[in-house]
Image (cartoon, grey):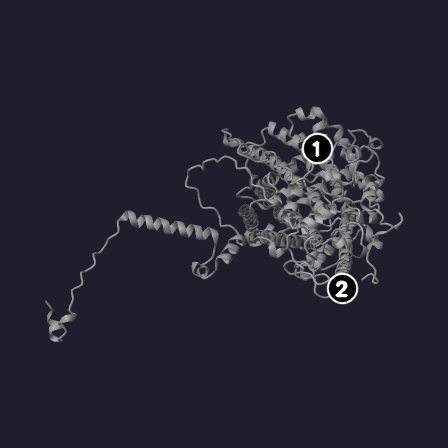
Amino acid sequence: MPCGQCLWYQHPDLCSYSKPAQRIVPSRKTVDRLQTQVDHYESIISRLFPGKDLATLVSLPREELINLTLTMPAAAPSPSSGSEPIPQAPVRPQKSDGADSLEALEQAPDQDLIVDEAKRHRDKVQGLSDDVNGLSLSVDHQSSYVGVSSISAALKVIFKTAPVARPFIVQSYTETALPSRSNTPPPHTLRTDPNLLPPADVGHKIIEAYFSQVHVLMPMIDEDQFWHTYLYGERRDSPWLALLNVVLALGTVAGVPGDKEEHIKYFQRARKHLDLETFGSGNLLVVQALGLMSGYYLHWLSRPNEANSLMGATLRMATALGLHREYTDGRSQATTTEMQDIANSRRRTWWTLCILDTWAFMTTGRPSLGRTGAAVTVQSPKIPEQMNNAQYLASLRLLPIIHNVSFCKLATKIQDKLACQSLLKPEELFSLDAELVRWHEELPPILRALPETPPQKQRTGPAHHGRPKSVTPSSATASNRNPFDFSQPPDRDSTTCPEVLKTPRAIMHWWYMTLRMLMHRPYLLAVALRRTPYASMTAEEKVAVSKCRSIAGDTIRDIQAMVREEVISGWCSVWLMYQAVMVPLVSLFSYLSSPAAYAHSGSPGQIATDFTAGGGEDVDRWRAQVEVAIKHLDSMQGFCHNAKKTRDVVQMLYDASKHVRQYQEAFHAQQQLLQRRQQEQSPPRQYDAAGVTPGMNVYNMAGVSGQISYGAPPGVQGAQQLGNSAWGLSPNGDTTMSSFWDDMLWDTIPEMPDPGNGGLATGLEQFDRMPLPGQGEDQRWTDWAFSEQQR
């Protein structure tokens, strides 16, 4: 029946009754479940996009969201719920085409006396040739194993992507050893009394140089106790004399010009007190002497294999002494201070050994073999909570080792992963990189703040007919001079870096940048081996390659800006500059060796600018980075005996890149000329995008005989197969490329012996530089360029 209102308005037919909706009251369980889901969503979003507002992400397309997750640093891990994670069975890493190509770069060491490090040093204590760090340019036969993180892997990629570069380097090679290195006296002429010590004033200055420049990087020795023992002459036993002579050797390296050989006599005396029976000793001084010798000094002598082997034995010896464990002492409080000093000395010794071993192994691609783990419970060195001015300065000198402990653990994890698989998974790579960035951001300002770029000035060195000044403090307390104004609380001066910390701060920053670059470099090597254009890379590869190039450029810039005119800083800068400059060099050779770089619509053979992101701008930037590195290495010759050799190697590679460009431009100009002649003499045919019909052999047109491959001169065996499969002239180029690298053996390339033993291989010239028909043996590489008349 219609209601009264509908009857009043005379619309009874529109009257209807709506049944009220039943109100549903959710249960508490449903509310909790929905709230848990929302929390999970927020947690995932915060981890994928830390610091981003959800409203700004809603409108982004899927590809931009993916790129954003790959480029942003990972958020800090959420606190554990208290339950231990369930251990999972190890998963065998999946191998991609790129990984297979990188694994092909690895090579078993040869039992070859020519490249044997031990034989090389029988007649010369300190040599320049170093195949572990790539200074010998010997990539075919090596005396030891190195992995994908090594310089040798980068050199192999360069020589494989641009085969023409290698014979050019062979022909342009000249002896680069300094006369002082070549005439290093043999060991038998340096035999002296192992108990002999330098005059008191000389020894005093050398030890001061050690504690002012070296000790802060590796503070395992108790400085006060060392000075007391030395000044009072209380000990003449072998453990003490071994440690004293190693300190004298390192102090001489740091405190006198780099072209002196005084340190060698102290090294010889120290070795007289260290023999195989020494490893059975339970003396902490012996561990410290062996650690300083193997972790630092032997690397200065360019003896990395001996250093790494001795460091491994030293770590085992330290483990036998229990330095890897943290102990609780239940004695009375009267001995608390003394026991804390002993515990801190043990902590500093253990972690100094681990840090030195980390630095040495980081650029070799070798596994750490358990440097850290669950059984290593020793804590980091401690700083007193309450201290006076002197204690405050001493504590500042411990800051580098305290924060290097965290870096060592991260670097060890990354090193083991790279040794296990050549290419890290993208998500794992970016997560580890975010951990490194977080470590750097959490450093105290006194270690993190970068100094301003100093004005450009001429550094002294042999190339400028000058000598670096000897850096030696004037008194035994020089290393404890107070660089702070203690009239104000220490926290007000937290950003001012004292003089004693500037070199450790720079070295810490360089190693941080180098590790980030080494993590990403395998992706650069992989795409270079596959000749993958930037546009054809996956999103993950683009991010990794771009990061690698960007970090390498920043490293070159930072080393140039932060280096100090002293031996310790200069030597480390040369070592790490050599690592960083390999990235722009690999990028240059990879770019210049690709036909796509010369596929220009303008003048024949002119280099293109759209092969990779940025094109010509990127190429100019890479060249500028290499030139900065060469300039820096040249300026460091007075502070590092390897600087000239390193500079010569980089200069030869840079000159070879210019030769590759000239050769490729001439080759592609000739190819285009031959194609035009063929088109004029033949009826129109259907061509593909590359201007070549399927099955066409452009090398046999117009009377061209022999096989000429991209980037390789005639006579380089296998280059035609590599060029065809990698660059698309073969219909199954990708498949051929993959199988080629799976079956590749580097032993098929002629041997290139150690330059330190008389130059590069003559056998390589016989195979890689064969005369063309009608040419004599006196042919030079300049004859390979096509003349203007031929164009």
Q: Position of residue 298 (x, y in %)?
A: 73, 37
**Mark 2 or 1, closer to the camera:** 2
Give amino acid for label 1.
Leu
Residue 715 lies, with reference to residue 627, above or below; the image says above
Q: Nearer the viewer, residue 188 or 749?
A: 749
Give amino acid for label 2.
Glu
Residue 383 lies, with reference to residue 609, above or below; the image says above
Q: Position of residue 484 (x, y in %)?
A: 62, 51
Q: Position of residue 258 (x, y in %)?
A: 78, 45
From the viewer's perspective, tell me whether residue 88 is left or right of residue 367.
left
Residue behind mark 1? 243
User: Mark 2 Cα within 10 Å, few/some/many (few <14, many 20+)?
Assistant: few
Q: Nearer the viewer, residue 685 or 132?
A: 685
Residue 759 lies, with reference to residue 60, above or below; the image says above
Mark 2 residue element: helix
Q: Residue at x 50, y 32 (%)?
A: 333
In which quadrant of the rendered view does residue 596 lie?
bottom right
Which residue is situated farthest in the bottom direction here?
A: 9
Tell me the tag on residue 680.
2
Q: Position of residue 644 (x, y in %)?
A: 79, 48
Q: Nearer the viewer, residue 598 or 540?
A: 598
Q: Residue at x 71, y 25 (%)?
A: 276
Asked whether residue 449 is in view, the answer is no
Which residue is situated farthest in the front direction here?
A: 683
Find out whether the residues at labels 2 and 1 contact each other: C-beta distance under 8 Å.
no
* Quadrant including the N terminus: bottom left
Give the distance between the C-alpha atoms of the residues marked 2 and 1, in whole angstroms: 81 Å
